[in-house]
Image: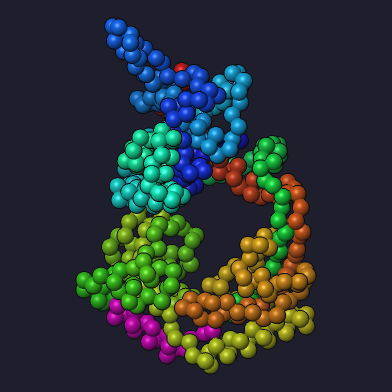
Amino acid sequence: MPLGRSVLLAAFGVLAGALAPRGVAAAQDTAAVAPPGPTVVAAGPGADSVLVVDRVVAVVGNRPVLASQVDEELFSRQAQGVQLPTEPDRLQALRRQVVSSIVDEELLVQQAARDTAIQVTDQEIADGVEQQVRKVRGNFSSEVDYQNELKKAGFQTPEEYRRWLTDQQRRAALQNRLIDGLRGAGKLKPVAPTEQEMRKFFDEQKAALGTRPATISFRQIVVTPKATAAAKARARAQADSIVLALRGGADFATAARRFSQDPGSRDQGGSLNWFRRGVMVPEFERVAFALKPGVISDPVESPFGYHIIQVERTQPAEVQARHILLTPAIDSANLAGARALAVSLSERLQQGASFDSLQRVHHDPSGGERQAQNVPADKLPEAYTKATAGADSGAVVPLFTLKGTGDREQFVVLQVTGRRSEGEIRYEDVQDRIRQQLGQELAIRRYIDQLRKSTYVEIRT
């Protein structure tokens, strides 16, 4: 029971090929999307010219839904390779479905606009639009080709395209924030789909699923070298001194570029952008979601080291933050000790020791999950691909290393727990994912149905 026009809006995108075509005026030769079309009236007494008046196909609250919006959606689907029906009855049914989806979207946008806790800033929208424009522009070798393609899509100028993109980006952001906020507040709990609904969904999507890739399942113990108490004390002292400087007015981004040992955020001034609960390690998350914007945290210890956190902005279910990470120094003796432990664990497993028991004691969660199920073999990181090559189910593979925080070595003890060859995707392969996705969609559907009952909605098609 998918919601048609992607009400979930997990990510906003406008690329369809090179550009998402915009409206019926952009492709007058495509008769398939012409009916019912806009209303045409005479522009003057002489009737030598005409004026095209967009037709209202629905009203949500006090906002109209126009026929051109339906055309935009249909053209967008065509650009993505979807074949539209040519029979008038089927095409009209599709248009009614699209109208209903646009109404759902508008209900969410209006509800988000009424929620004073939801904030979407002009700057974040501008940043998103700029990134998308650069991505689209990069598909063309010249500015002339770019502008020609824009015109084919119905945009007379790049500025007009930016204005349209800005509106779409803002609407998507409002819907995302509303849904995320409801989930975070426990007001949008998944609805358990029936087996019949799940089977129907699978049958409808089966053709698009393709074949199942070859997969591998495994469990692992990641051993990380442990810093000495003296090394940890030095890192903590440095973190304390940086906190004092920041609270005295030093620039956080500048300090992050100078001191942080997190290669993923250091060059961005420590920026972690927006993140939700469950993404960061618990020690970090507890502090980040409790801080007020602008406040500098005390040093926070996690498996990665010591973090200094500054929250920039907050939403009900997510925060935007920066951090500076200081990792205690690891010497050769620490490294040798970790390697020796990993070798010992591997030998004990091959002699029949309990994997679960050793994993509970020795696995470092900063090195990854304890186990992985049915991972596509061609999506494995290179180190895992090399280590597991040719290993059958049950085999403990030779010890291998990963690069951890600050390029430090971590030692991986891994046992293959299953392999599956490439083949046709079965219902059982995707059953859990279908249950999760449908559960979320059904929850949103129920919420939208409540909004329909409390909002004036008129469908005119």
**Residue 401 lies within the magenta run:** no
Q: Which residue is drawn at 66% across and 78% down?
A: 413
Q: Residue at x 43, y 58 (%)?
A: 275
Across and down, in percent, residue 346 comes to 70, 82
**Magenta segment, principal secondary structure?**
helix
Bounds of the magenta span? 225-242
Let me know if residue 298 appears in the view.
no
Image side of residue 412 versus residue 392, left or right: left
Q: Residue at x 59, y 29 (%)?
A: 84
Image side of residue 96 versus residue 148, left or right: right
Image side of residue 224 versus residue 264, left or right: right
Please, is residue 391 above or below residue 224 in the view? above
Display coloring: rainbow
Q: Which residue is drawn at 50% across and 35% down?
A: 76
Across and down, in percent, residue 119 comes to 33, 47
Let me know if residue 393 appears in the view.
yes
Please, is residue 311 above or below residue 232 in the view? above
Across and down, in percent, residue 34 comes to 50, 21
Q: Which of 433 and 267 is in front in this view?
A: 267
Across and down, in percent, residue 419 comes to 75, 63
- Quarter of the figure with the N terminus: top right
Determine the residue located farthest toward the left in the rendered image. 248
**Residue 231 lies within the magenta run:** yes
Determine the residue located farthest toward the top in the rendered image. 45
What number of labels is visible?
0
Determine the residue located farthest toward the bottom in the rendered image. 333
Residue 190 sits in which quadrant? Answer: top right
